[in-house]
Image: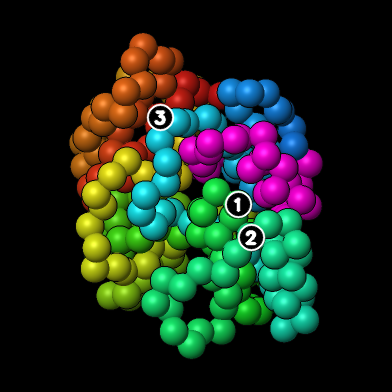
Amino acid sequence: MATRLYDVVVDAADPVELGRFWSALLAQPITGESADEVDMTLCPGMGLVFVPVSDPKVVKNRLHLDLASTSAEHQAALVARARELGAEPVDLGQGSVPWVVLADPEGNEFCVLEPRDEYLGLGPVAAVVVDALDPRAQAAFWSRATGLPVTREHAEYASLRQESGCWVEFVRVDEAKTVKNRVHLDVVPPADGDLPTEVVRLEAQGAVRADVGQGAVSWVVLADPEGNEFCVLTPR
């Protein structure tokens, strides 16, 4: 069994309030709530976690969520629901596109997609989307890291497909990463694996150690080849 994607983790000034926004928008119950962490299901096999930070958001996030819709009416209803909950429209220079770009109450960008056949039946979240200077190379790294197949590949984008879960997609941008990501991924080794061995394997694939001020913790913080931090947790 390969290392698997486990959580999408979001830094938050107020994890409780932000978690409640996303719980209402995704119609997913909160499974754990404290001042230090708020948890819910993102899609089958993956969680969505909000943790407290004191640093403000200063740049566009390099990771964001794409929400799925099943019809034009459903897309409009999702946008309206998000606006009622406190989301605001965002202009990232996207121009005239069939999806809608919004930001949650703490400014984290997300997209409400028009209906797309490939996302039917996945639930509210279509994909976790990662900005990339080289989508093909990033998809290749994450495919090696997790064992997920690369199902679409193009100079402008590349996709990994999770069985019955949201996609992981890499979309080309011109801007390199400049600050610690406010949204990151957590991965876990297989149940019969161990943390040190998995860290060595990921480093051999191109990951590097990252210091984000984590101190003495039970997990290891790495960065992928484009500098996106991710945490390797102990086996579950």
Residue 153: x and y, percent? 35, 71
Residue 154: x and y, percent? 32, 75
Q: CA distance from mark 1 to mark 3?
A: 28 Å
Instruction: Give the residue pinned by disc 3.
Output: 232
Which of the numbered marks, if any, corresponds to residue 105? Answer: 1
For label 3, count other residues whose C-alpha is less than 10 Å away and answer few (under 14), some (14-19) or many (20+). many
Determine the image quadrant of residue 76.
Answer: bottom right
Q: CA distance from mark 2 to mark 1?
A: 6 Å
Residue 211: x and y, percent? 26, 27
Residue 214 visible here: yes
Mark 2 in CB contact with mark 1 (< 8 angstroms): yes
Instruction: Give the residue pinned by disc 2.
Output: 87
In screen coordinates, is 110 left or right of 199? right
At label 1, the amino acid type is Pro
Counting residues from the N terminus, which is met first, the one under dot 1 or under dot 3?
1
Counting residues from the N terminus, which is met first, the one under dot 3 or under dot 2?
2
Q: Nearer the viewer, residue 3 or 91?
A: 91
Q: Residue at x 65, y 68 (%)?
A: 68
At label 2, the amino acid type is Ala
**What colouring does the structure picture have?**
rainbow
At label 3, the amino acid type is Val
State which region is magenta: 1-29
